[in-house]
Image (cartoon, rainbow, N blue to C red):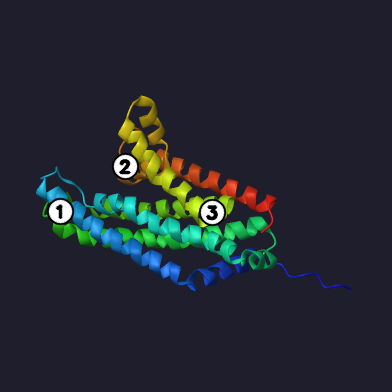
Amino acid sequence: MTEQPRTATLAQAIGCEWAKLWSVRTTAACLLAGLALTGVFTFYYGSIARINAYPLQPLGNAPVSSLTLGQFALLILAMATVTSEYATGSARASLLWVPVRARLHLAKSAVTAAVACAAGVVFGVVGLAVAWGPFGGRATFDAAEAAVQVLGMGVYCALLAVLAVGVAFALRTAAPAMSVLVVLVAGLPALCTGLGGPFLLAVNDVLPQTAGTYFLRGGEAPYPAPVGLLIVLGWAFAAHVAGLTVLRSRDA
């Protein structure tokens, strides 16, 4: 009787992806870059608020705003977990170990989302600490509100990681994948707000970064925070489906 080849379970696939993630220098480099960007941007944000005598605002707005830069470190990290394997040919080994492609896709998404979530929370805590001094009394601090914003940053970063993994599986190579992510996350919002007009502003309101900002800052205009979360979740789900569809239909 011929022995059937062993197929990795989801837990084993997640363990393998976790080991691979921490075996390369890119992971630490991206996380440190994100942390550095958070520190620099939150210090700048607080300083500008003090110098220009802006109205009082929640201290958590500083680290939330810093994600406009810090998020790209996490997008690169998540994207590289996929594109680096296609570039080196190790994607074949991954598919031999985890031939169930939906399982492989889910394992990569779960691992990168977990790391991005933890990183987002750390970025938030560090941002709060760094921004307090430069604000110079131009910020309010409520522990519960700050905790919600910090945890929200973790959730937003996790969904961005899922989005990046999906795009990377759909496009397979780093340059096109990063181009799409940059345009979607930063390019389109800048274009829509720069050109203005009711239609473009309405489009901007449903883009991932804009929806994420509404989710993290709260409020009711143009929609409440939970709607912003659902919009970002929808983008992550759509990218996940697109990536899985390509992964299932094409050879490594």
The residue located at (36%, 37%) in the rendering is: 191
Instruction: Depth check: give the residue in front, 149 or 30.
Output: 30
Q: Nearer the viewer, mark 1 or mark 2?
A: 1
Return the mark for residue 15. none
Mark 3–mark 2 Cα distance, whole angstroms, equals 30 Å
Q: Amino acid at mark 2?
A: Gly
Residue tagged 3: 168
Residue tagged 1: 47
x, y percent for residue 239: 54, 47
Quadrant in the rendering for residue 32: bottom left
Q: Quadrant of the C terminus?
A: bottom right
Q: Is residue 84 found left or right of 33 in the rendered image?
A: right
The residue located at (14%, 44%) in the rendering is: 54
Q: Amino acid at mark 1?
A: Ser
The residue located at (48%, 45%) in the rendering is: 233
Q: Is residue 110 found left or right of 12 in the rendered image?
A: left
Residue tagged 2: 218
